Image: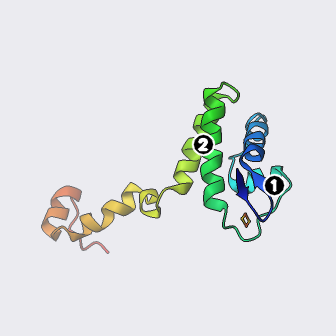
Amino acid sequence: MIVCSCAYVTDRDLEQAVLEVMSQPNAPLPTPGVIYRHLQKKMQCCGCAPLAAETIYAKMEDLEKRGLICPCACATAKTRMKDIMSPPERRVSRTLREAPRALSQPAAARQKVTGSSGSSF
Ligand code: FES
């Protein structure tokens, strides 16, 4: 299957590149950019980027199931890629998410919880 028609990249090319990249010591995160660079290809219109990322994920899982890449390296890469590809609101730290809730509490409640008068600014 052709994944990228601009640079002519197939799913087999991606599989081979994922295998080679993930077999390196301290393997980099196999993003489409890393994989295309490994293939010495360059995206032009970038219309294939979502399909390329999806294919890379699928190939990683398949290679892991076949025992061709280290499950530990694969798990680390998947976790890092999930963080990168998650919606922005999921990446917001817990502190930032809870700050507006704490500020909307009445001053007396904040004082009880924090022990401050709330006017120490
Ligand atoms: S389809 Fe891949 S860069 Fe255009």
Q: Which residue is mark 2?
A: 58
Query: Residue 3 sits in which quadrant?
Result: bottom right
User: Residue shown at 59%/51% (left/top)?
Assistant: 54
In this rendering, position of residue 22 left or right of residue 72: right
Residue topped by disc 1 = 37
Closer to the N terminus: mark 2 or mark 1?
1
* Residue at mark 1: C-beta within 8 A of ligand 1: no
The amino acid type, in three-letter code, at marker 1 is Arg
Examine the rendered structure and indicate whether residue 116 appears above or below residue 68: below
Q: Crowding near pointer 1: few (<14 within 10 Å), some, many (20+)?
A: few
Question: Within the image, what quadrant is residue 19 found in?
Answer: top right
Cα distance, mark 2 to mark 1? 19 Å
Identify the secondary structure beneath mark 1: helix
Asked if the residues shown at circle 2 and circle 1 are in contact, with their CB atoms under 8 angstroms apart, the answer is no
Disc 2 vs disc 1: which is toward the camera? Answer: 2
Q: Residue at x 23, y 58 (%)?
A: 114
Residue shown at 38% from the left, 63% from the top = 96
Which coloring applies here? rainbow
Identify the residue shown where x is 58% and y is 35%: 75
Residue type of the residue flagged with mark 2: Ala
Q: Residue 113: x percent and y percent? A: 19, 56
- State the residue in front, 45 or 104: 45
Ligand 1, image quadrant it occupies: bottom right
Give the structural element (helix, strand or loop) at label 2. helix
113 in relation to 21, above or below: below
Whether residue 87 sits left or right of residue 99 in the image: it is right
Residue 50, position as x, y percentages in the image: 60, 59
